[in-house]
Amino acid sequence: QVQLVESGGGSVEAGGSLRLSCTASSYTVSTYDMMWYRQAPGKEREFVSLINVIGSTRYADSVKGRFTMSRDNAKSTVYLQMNSLKPDDTAMYYCRCDIYWGQGTQVTVS
């Protein structure tokens, strides 16, 4: 079983930045595609970004150009650098690997 632990959420003003981290319990990060999703209150969970095993990334149109996903295999960790944050980015952010999900980290932009 894979365990995913997110961190780095918080409250920021519009235009600010945050960096989320997701640490996996095993070598998962280097051998599986890793993803970030988010869920705002009253809305469905939505895809944010993906990084595959060769390091290629893909982003939702709503975050393209503002968010950057990266991976550190040695630390079994993926990151989501979020810049130019908007109130619409307010949500619980979840890390996902295959069928496994983290517990989420809250991002609030005012």
Image (cartoon, rainbow, N blue to C red):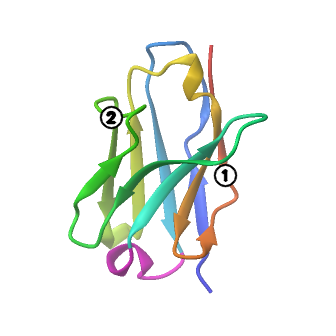
Residue drawn 43% across the image and 79% down it: 28
Q: Quadrant of residue 25?
A: bottom right
Residue drawn 38% across the image and 57% down it: 50
Q: Quadrant of residue 32?
A: bottom left
Q: Is residue 28 above or below residue 49?
A: below
Residue 97 on image: x %, y %: 51, 71
Residue drawn 66% across the image and 52% down it: 104
Residue type of the residue flagged with mark 1: Gly
Q: Residue furthest right?
A: 42
- Specify the label residue 61 is tagged with: none
Residue type of the residue flagged with mark 2: Lys
Residue 40 on image: x %, y %: 69, 35
Tell me if mark 1 has few (under 14), some (14-19) or many (20+) residues whose alpha carbon lies within 10 angstroms of its own.
many
State the residue position of label 1: 104
Residue drawn 38% across the image and 39% down it: 81
State the residue position of label 2: 64
SS under mark 2: loop
Tell me if mark 2 has few (under 14), some (14-19) or many (20+) residues whose alpha carbon lies within 10 angstroms of its own.
few
Residue 35 on image: x %, y %: 46, 59
**Mark positioned earlier in the residue sequence (2 or 1):** 2
**Span colored in magenta:** 25-32
Q: CA distance from mark 2 to mark 1?
A: 21 Å
For the C terminus, the image quarter is top right
